[in-house]
Image (tube, grey):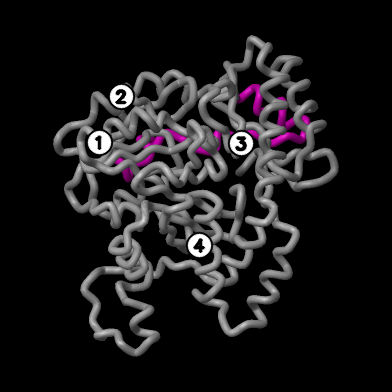
C-alpha cells in the first residue's frame, strides 16, 4: 500500500509537478477538431517549422508521438544496429536506454558527474574505443552537459552525439541553443515537460534531406507518405518502420505552447534562482548544477543532495509538500543486466532529492519549502 499517495493541487499543498496548459490551447484544439485533419496534417508541419525556427534554426525537425518514439527514431537515423556499442548515461529516465534495447545495442553505462548528475566526461573517455558507435548524453534537470568535450570526442572517433534533451527545452550552452549543436537531439512534450502536447517528442538534426526523408518514412510504417498521397508511391516497403508520427491535435497544443514559452521559461528560471539564493548558504544542502556560468539552465527540475533524504521527504510530506527522486540509476532494473559499480552514482544514489518546480507555484511557495528545509529534519 502506498503510504504517500499523490497530493491534490490546491489548498496549501505544493505538488512536485503540474502540467502547463497554454492560454490559447482551447482555441487551437477547437480549430483542429473542426477541420479536416485531426491525424498527421498541416499543424504537424507548422509545429515542426515553428519549433525549428525557435530552437534550432538551420536544422531539420521530425515530431513523434512520444519522446521515447523520438529517441528510437534518433538511434535508427544514427545508423545504430544490433551488436553496436553505445555509451549512455547510467542515471536517466529508462526511456533513454530502453530505446537502445529495441535495437539490440550493447549499452556501456557511464557514471555521473557528482556536481551536475550529468554524464561524466572522464568516464566516457575511459569507456570509448573503436567499437563505440555513438555517445548519448542527458541534460539532467535542464542543465546542459559539457558539449565541447563531447563534440571533441565525436570528431576524434567520427561518431554521433545524441542528446536526450527531455529536460532541457530552452537551455543554451555557450550561447548555442540545445537542439542546434549535435547530430541528433531529442525533446519530450510529455504531460509535465516545459511544453506538453499531451504526449509527444521531437528530433532535431542538421539539415539533410536524406535523413529527413528516411525519418518521415520510418515514423510512418516505412511508407513514403507524401508519394502515397500524390498517387506516385511504388507500393513497396523496404524499411521496417513504426507508427511514431505526431497528430494535429497534439501539434495544436504545441503551437499554443510556443506562443508563451519564453515567459514560462523565465518564470521557471526565477523559481530556480530563488531556490539557489535561499539554500546556497545552508551547509546541510548541496545544490545540483546551480552555479555554472557558461550555460543556461532550463529549470525543469531543482535537485539537492542531502543526508537522511527520506527523513527530509517525510518532513516535507507532513507539511503537504511533494518531493521525490524521479529518476534512478538504470542498472537497478533487470532488463539492463544487473547492477555494477559506479563510484559517483554509488555515493549519491540515496541522497538526491527533487523539489517542486512548475508554473502553478510562486516565489512564496519556494520560500515556504526552503524555510522548512532550513529548520532541519
* Front tag of 1 and 3: 1
Disc on the earlier residue, 1 or 3: 1
Distance in Å between CA atoms under marks 4 and 1: 28 Å
* Disc 4 crowd, CA 10 A, few/some/many (<14, 14-19, 20+): many
* Disc 3 crowd, CA 10 A, few/some/many (<14, 14-19, 20+): many
* Front tag of 4 and 3: 4
Distance in Å between CA atoms under marks 3 and 2: 26 Å
- Circles 3 and 2: CB atoms closer than 8 Å: no
Magenta stretch contains residue 273: no
Residue 223 in the image, given as x and y percentages of width and height: 31, 76
Q: Which residue is mark 1?
A: 155
Disc on the earlier residue, 1 or 2: 2
Residue 36 in the image, given as x and y percentages of width and height: 58, 84
Disc on the earlier residue, 4 or 3: 4
Distance in Å between CA atoms under marks 2 and 4: 35 Å
Q: Which mark, by number, is residue 123?
A: 2
Looking at the rendering, which quadrant does residue 307 occupy? top right
Query: Quadrant of the image for the N terminus?
Result: top right
Magenta stretch contains residue 317: yes
Residue at 68 percent across and 12 percent down: it is: 282
Residues shaded magenta: 310-336
Amino acid at each position: 500500500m502506498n503510504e504517500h499517495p499523490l497530493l491534490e493541487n490546491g489548498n496549501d499543498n505544493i505538488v512536485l509537478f503540474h502540467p502547463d496548459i497554454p492560454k490559447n490551447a482551447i482555441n487551437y484544439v477547437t480549430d483542429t477538431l473542426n477541420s479536416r485533419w485531426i491525424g498527421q496534417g498541416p499543424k504537424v508541419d507548422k509545429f515542426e517549422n515553428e519549433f525549428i525556427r525557435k530552437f534550432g534554426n538551420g536544422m531539420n525537425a521530425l515530431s513523434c508521438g512520444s519522446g521515447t518514439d523520438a529517441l528510437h527514431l534518433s538511434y535508427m537515423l544514427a545508423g545504430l544496429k544490433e551488436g553496436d556499442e553505445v555509451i549512455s548515461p547510467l542515471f536517466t529516465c529508462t526511456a533513454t536506454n530502453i530505446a537502445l534495447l529495441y535495437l539490440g545495442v550493447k549499452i556501456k553505462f557511464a557514471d555521473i558527474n557528482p556536481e551536475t548528475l550529468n554524464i561524466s566526461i572522464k568516464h566516457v573517455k575511459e569507456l570509448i574505443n573503436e567499437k563505440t558507435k555513438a555517445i548519448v548524453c542527458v541534460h539532467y534537470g535542464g542543465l546542459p552537459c559539457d558539449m565541447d568535450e563531447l563534440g571533441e570526442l565525436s570528431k576524434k572517433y567520427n561518431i554521433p552525439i545524441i542528446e536526450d534533451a527531455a529536460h532541457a527545452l530552452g537551455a543554451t550552452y555557450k550561447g548555442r541553443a540545445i537542439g542546434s549543436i549535435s547530430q541528433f537531439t531529442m525533446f519530450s512534450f510529455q504531460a509535465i515537460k516545459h511544453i506538453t502536447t499531451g504526449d509527444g517528442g521531437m528530433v532535431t538534426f542538421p539539415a539533410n534531406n536524406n535523413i529527413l526523408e528516411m525519418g518521415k518514412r520510418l515514423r510512418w510504417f516505412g511508407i513514403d507518405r507524401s508519394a502515397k498521397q500524390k498517387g506516385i508511391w511504388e507500393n513497396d516497403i523496404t524499411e521496417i518502420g513504426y507508427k511514431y508520427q505526431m497528430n494535429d491535435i497534439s501539434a495544436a497544443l504545441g503551437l499554443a505552447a510556443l506562443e508563451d514559452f519564453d515567459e514560462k521559461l523565465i518564470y521557471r528560471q526565477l523559481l530556480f534562482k530563488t531556490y539557489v539564493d535561499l539554500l546556497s548558504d545552508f551547509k546541510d544542502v548541496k545544490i545540483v548544477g546551480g552555479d555554472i556560468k557558461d550555460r543556461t539552465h532550463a529549470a525543469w527540475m531543482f535537485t539537492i543532495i542531502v543526508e537522511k533524504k527520506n527523513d527530509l521527504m517525510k518532513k516535507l510530506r507532513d507539511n503537504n509538500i511533494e518531493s521525490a527522486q524521479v529518476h534512478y540509476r538504470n542498472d537497478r532494473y533487470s532488463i539492463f543486466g544487473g547492477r555494477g559499480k559506479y563510484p559517483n552514482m554509488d555515493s549519491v544514489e540515496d541522497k538526491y532529492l527533487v523539489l517542486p518546480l512548475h508554473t502553478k507555484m510562486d516565489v512564496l511557495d519556494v520560500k515556504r519549502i526552503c524555510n522548512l528545509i532550513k529548520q532541519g529534519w
